[in-house]
Image (cartoon, rainbow, N blue to C red):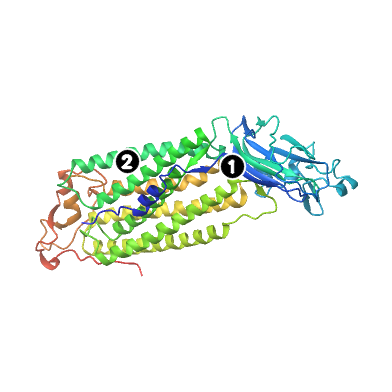
């Protein structure tokens, strides 16, 4: 009897990350320089459920050294916070929101002497605002020549930038626009905080969703474990352990994600232990679900006692490959997010890692296609064997499994199209975008629940899995009729009426007529 793998990668990740590390979230560190350049600005984005605010009180500004090449008597740091509506599009032109000015086909962020000359702005060395369009909050920090002294710190007066307008995505900009001004070092942290806490507004609905999913997994796991206990060991079959393990992995993932969001909302930071253990539990669940579907499609628990060794090795190899690539894709996505939030981005920078994310996504699509081909091929072969051997009651179960698989596969394809459309067209509000992201988890929950119901523990599970159905009262003993009275044991409670027309004979027992010997089962592997 084979037991479910212990998922050493999951355990290793959790143990390695037991140290009290934190990941920047809505309380974000910023340690760097605001260079005195007029052709770009620094920015950071976050999501707020209003009324909310951005707190700059823990940011310290200093001039670490004097530069003789800088001749201006002053440097002014401009800080702006404004709402970016969904209608502005995925590549929003901030000049339409009152920040910057379109000039010669590009955006001019800062006012220069030449821009003043042509009437584009009024004060050189400052961020350009269109007061008619700009509806956000603005702050300034003036640094005069010789003030502060080297290594002295300055702080923004009135550092809490409160927003009471629309909820959604907000942009925080810092600019050092005077080309002849002083380089300013920024050190400390700033925080996006919504009315409910630090959790971003675009994840607030997802938090509630995972609470509901956690409850669903708790109910499913409790029911399945209780049913196994009730019929153990008389009617126990080993595939039930795999099904329960998959359910428990889903429960663990939902629990960790819920705890992660609770901590994030309360403290504004994410703990590395929860973050990466959540990733490990998620990819482990996804891997186990795929391996489980392959094994039940091969007939385990219905036409065979065990999966032969060389087929099991192939299942494990493909599972390990999927686990590795899926974990890498999730980690790269987290690293990209951390890099975006660890400091201000510059309008002159290009985001990294997107190439790696695209490659990993394509690899995952390829592996998922391979899984689907293997599952359908194995299921078709198993159904053919059942039909040829007149195992009609077992064939009913596989028809139900095929319908379940095709339904949720179509759902997954629709989800993929929805996600691509959302990326391209942004038709969902930022506070609704989580819906598209988590819909796939319903696919896993539905598929796992369906398999658990079809292979649920009951008093006839072992007899049903390991015995053959033979007709009684027929002289030829070769034909079985599938009638409406035939009930799949795992789909409804067993009764003696289900066995009126059949007797259960062990597969190794002598069979009448031309059906001597056990049910022929091939170790089908997709080629």
Look at 53% across and 53% down and name the residue there: 417
Q: Quadrant of residue 218?
A: top left
Whether the residues at callouts 1 and 2 have beta carbons within 8 Å, the answer is no
Task: Decide if residue 424 is on the left or right side of residue 67.
Answer: left
Q: Residue furthest right?
A: 117
Q: Above or below — where is 312 with respect to 157?
A: below
Please provide percent x and percent y for residue 376.
36, 61
Please provide percent x and percent y for residue 29.
59, 42
Please provide percent x and percent y for residue 289.
35, 53
Q: Residues within 10 Å of mark 2 (few under 14, many from 20)?
A: many
* Numbered badge on residue 220: 2
Which residue is at the front of the view, 502 or 2? 2
Judge whether residue 387 can be spotted in this image. yes
Q: Earlier in the sequence, mark 1 or mark 2?
A: 1
Which residue is at the front of the view, 408 or 503? 408
Q: Residues within 10 Å of mark 1 (few under 14, many from 20)?
A: many
Judge whether residue 84 can be spotted in this image. no
The C terminus lies in which quarter of the figure?
bottom left
Q: Above or below — where is 221 with respect to 523?
A: above
Q: Above or below — where is 104 with respect to 29?
A: below
Task: Decide if residue 383 is on the left or right side of residue 76.
Answer: left
Question: Which residue position is annotated with label 1?
Answer: 29
């Amino acid at each position: 009897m084979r037991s479910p793998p212990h998922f050493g990668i999951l355990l290793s990740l959790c143990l390695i990350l037991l140290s009290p590390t934190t990941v920047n979230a809505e309380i974000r560190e910023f340690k760097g320089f605001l260079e005195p350049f007029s052709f770009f600005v620094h920015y950071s984005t976050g999501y707020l459920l209003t009324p909310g605010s951005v707190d700059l009180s823990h940011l310290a500004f200093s001039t670490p050294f004097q530069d003789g090449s800088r001749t201006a008597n002053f440097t002014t740091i401009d800080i702006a916070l404004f709402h970016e509506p969904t209608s502005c599009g995925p590549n929003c032109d901030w000049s339409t929101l009152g920040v910057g000015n379109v000039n010669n086909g590009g955006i001019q962020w800062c006012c220069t002497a030449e821009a003043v000359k042509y009437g584009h702005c009024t004060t050189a060395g400052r961020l350009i605002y269109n007061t008619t369009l700009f509806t956000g909050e603005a702050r300034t920090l003036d640094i005069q020549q010789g003030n502060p002294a080297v290594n002295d710190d300055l702080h923004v007066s009135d550092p809490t930038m409160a927003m009471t307008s629309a909820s959604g995505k907000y942009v925080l900009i810092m600019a050092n626009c005077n080309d002849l001004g002083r380089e300013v070092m920024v050190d400390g942290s700033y925080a996006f905080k919504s009315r409910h806490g630090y959790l971003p507004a675009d994840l607030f609905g997802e938090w509630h969703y995972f609470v509901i999913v956690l409850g669903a997994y708790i109910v499913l796991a409790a029911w399945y474990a209780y049913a196994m206990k009730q019929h153990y060991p008389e009617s126990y079959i080993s595939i039930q352990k795999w099904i329960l393990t998959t359910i428990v992995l889903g429960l663990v993932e939902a629990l960790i994600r819920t705890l992660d969001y609770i901590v994030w909302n309360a403290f504004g930071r994410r703990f590395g232990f929860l973050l990466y253990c959540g990733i490990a539990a998620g990819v482990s669940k996804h891997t186990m679900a795929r391996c489980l579907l392959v094994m039940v499609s091969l007939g385990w628990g219905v036409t065979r006692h065990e999966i032969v060794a060389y087929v099991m090795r192939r299942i494990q190899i493909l599972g390990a490959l999927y686990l590795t690539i899926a974990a890498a894709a999730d980690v790269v996505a987290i690293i990209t997010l951390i890099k975006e939030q660890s400091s201000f981005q510059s309008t002159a920078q290009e985001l990294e890692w997107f190439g790696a994310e695209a490659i990993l996504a394509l690899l995952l699509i390829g592996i998922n296609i391979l899984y689907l081909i293997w599952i359908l091929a194995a299921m078709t072969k198993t159904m053919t064997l059942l039909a040829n051997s007149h195992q009609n009651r077992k064939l009913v179960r596989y028809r139900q499994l095929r319908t379940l698989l095709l339904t949720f596969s179509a759902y997954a394809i629709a989800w993929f199209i929805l996600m691509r459309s959302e990326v391209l067209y942004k038709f969902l509000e930022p506070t609704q975008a989580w819906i598209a992201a988590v819909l796939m988890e319903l696919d896993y929950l539905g598929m796992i629940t369906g398999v658990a119901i079809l292979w649920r523990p009951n008093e006839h599970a072992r007899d049903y899995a390991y015995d053959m159905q033979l007709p009684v009262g027929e002289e030829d003993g070769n034909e079985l009729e599938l009638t409406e009275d035939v009930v799949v044991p795992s789909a409804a409670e067993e009764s003696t009426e289900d066995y009126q027309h059949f007797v259960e004979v062990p597969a190794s027992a002598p069979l009448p007529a031309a059906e001597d010997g056990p049910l022929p089962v091939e170790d089908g592997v997709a080629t």
